[in-house]
């Protein structure tokens, strides 16, 4: 099997272009869907509760407006349910394209590591093939995290009650558990695609790898962290240096500088970050093939 840098040298550009074009196409479709659903949802809610909103915001006194809004929310549970459903629909819409991108990227890199010919068509074919598996895996992972999320509310209530030391310890414990879960789940996507197993089987298998081959899994974690730092550090340095230089400049120069920072960040987001994602995915997949399938 090829080494990491050999694969990156021969296939890195193809992988980057495939993922970049796939990301752009997916984001365009997602933006159109969000605008359509968002406008439709806001119009529907607006028409349904138009008279209530008119009565609430007709007050010139801010306190009366707030009181009227609170009374409306308390006395109209159907509005809360509608908002929750609306948020869930938007979340579901965003989950599908993100799962498609993830499936396409892992499928594309898996084909490349296996020595098969891979291009933009491969990205879309793998994305379409595995998107619903990836959606289901994402939902299962969300359910795994849900108890931890609910438990994280405990330190917040303790802080409200005046406690300090106990909430900090609980936050640190929750953060550590979340980190271990992220590491344990790292190989679930590639295991599902490479081994052609169910989403839940891949999740269990990924945790099994973590406990059986902890050192090799941490090697993958360090690879991902190293690549991420390598790519994000230059942007951080540029942003900090420009911010320091602009702090003593005129308002006009600060405006131009802030615009420059935003342009650099946007350019980074749409060109450099996709290549970083290609490199991290390639590292995870290759290390899985080389070291973890034999463990």
Image (cartoon, helix red, strand yellow):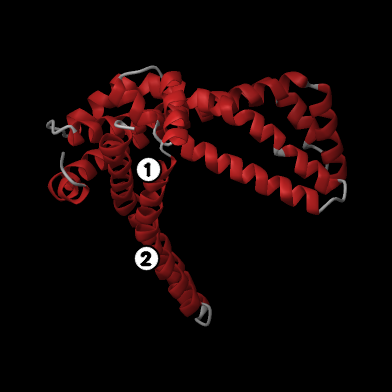
Q: Nearer the viewer, residue 266 or 10?
A: 10
Apparent side of residue 173 relative to residue 277 in the rendered image (left or right): right
Q: Residues within 10 Å of mark 1 (few under 14, many from 20)?
A: some
Q: Secondary structure at mark 1?
A: helix
Res 225 visible:
yes
* Residue 3 on image: x %, y %: 18, 46
Q: Which of the two labelled residues, at mark 2 and mark 1, occupies the earlier sequence position?
A: 1
Q: Nearer the viewer, residue 32 or 197?
A: 197
- Tell me if residue 164 comes above or below residue 93 in the rendering: below
Q: CA distance from mark 2 to mark 1?
A: 28 Å
At a point 52% along the width and 82% down the height, the residue shown is 248
Q: Residues within 10 Å of mark 2 (few under 14, many from 20)?
A: few
- Tell me if residue 261 comes above or below residue 13 in the rendering: below
Quarter of the image that includes the N terminus: top left
Query: Residue tagged by mark 1?
Result: 216
Apparent side of residue 124 relative to residue 84 in the rendered image (left or right): left
At a point 17% along the width and 42% down the height, the residue shown is 14
- Tell me if residue 255 comes above or below residue 249 in the rendering: above
- Tell me if residue 243 comes above or below residue 89 in the rendering: below
Q: Nearer the viewer, residue 101 or 142?
A: 142
């Amino acid at each position: 099997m090829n080494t990491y840098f050999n694969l990156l040298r021969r296939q890195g550009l193809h992988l980057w272009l495939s993922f970049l074009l796939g990301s752009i196409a997916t984001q365009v479709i997602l933006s159109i869907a969000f605008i359509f659903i968002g406008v439709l949802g806001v119009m529907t809610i607006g028409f349904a509760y138009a008279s209530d909103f008119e009565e609430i915001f007709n007050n010139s006194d801010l306190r009366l407006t707030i009181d009227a809004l609170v009374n409306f929310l308390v006395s109209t549970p159907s509005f809360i349910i509608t908002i929750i459903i609306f948020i869930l629909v938007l979340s579901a819409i965003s989950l599908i394209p993100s799962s498609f991108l993830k499936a396409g990227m892992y499928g594309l890199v898996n084909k490349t590591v296996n020595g098969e010919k891979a291009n933009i068509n491969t990205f879309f074919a793998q994305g379409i093939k595995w998107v619903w598996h990836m959606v289901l895996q994402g939902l299962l992972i969300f359910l795994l995290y849900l108890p931890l999320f609910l438990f994280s509310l405990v330190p917040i209530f303790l802080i409200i009650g005046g406690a300090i030391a106990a909430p900090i310890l609980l936050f640190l414990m929750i953060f550590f558990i979340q980190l271990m879960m992220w590491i344990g789940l790292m190989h679930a996507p590639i295991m599902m695609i490479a081994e052609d197993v169910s989403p839940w089987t891949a999740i269990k298998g990924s945790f099994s790898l973590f406990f059986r081959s902890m050192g090799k899994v941490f090697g993958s974690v360090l690879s991902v962290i190293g690549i991420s730092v390598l790519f994000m550090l230059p942007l951080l340095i540029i942003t900090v240096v420009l911010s320091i230089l602009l702090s003593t400049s005129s308002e006009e120069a600060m405006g131009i500088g802030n615009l420059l920072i935003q342009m650099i960040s946007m350019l980074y987001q749409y060109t450099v970050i996709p290549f970083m994602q290609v490199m991290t995915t390639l590292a995870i997949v290759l290390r899985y093939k080389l070291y973890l399938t034999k463990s």
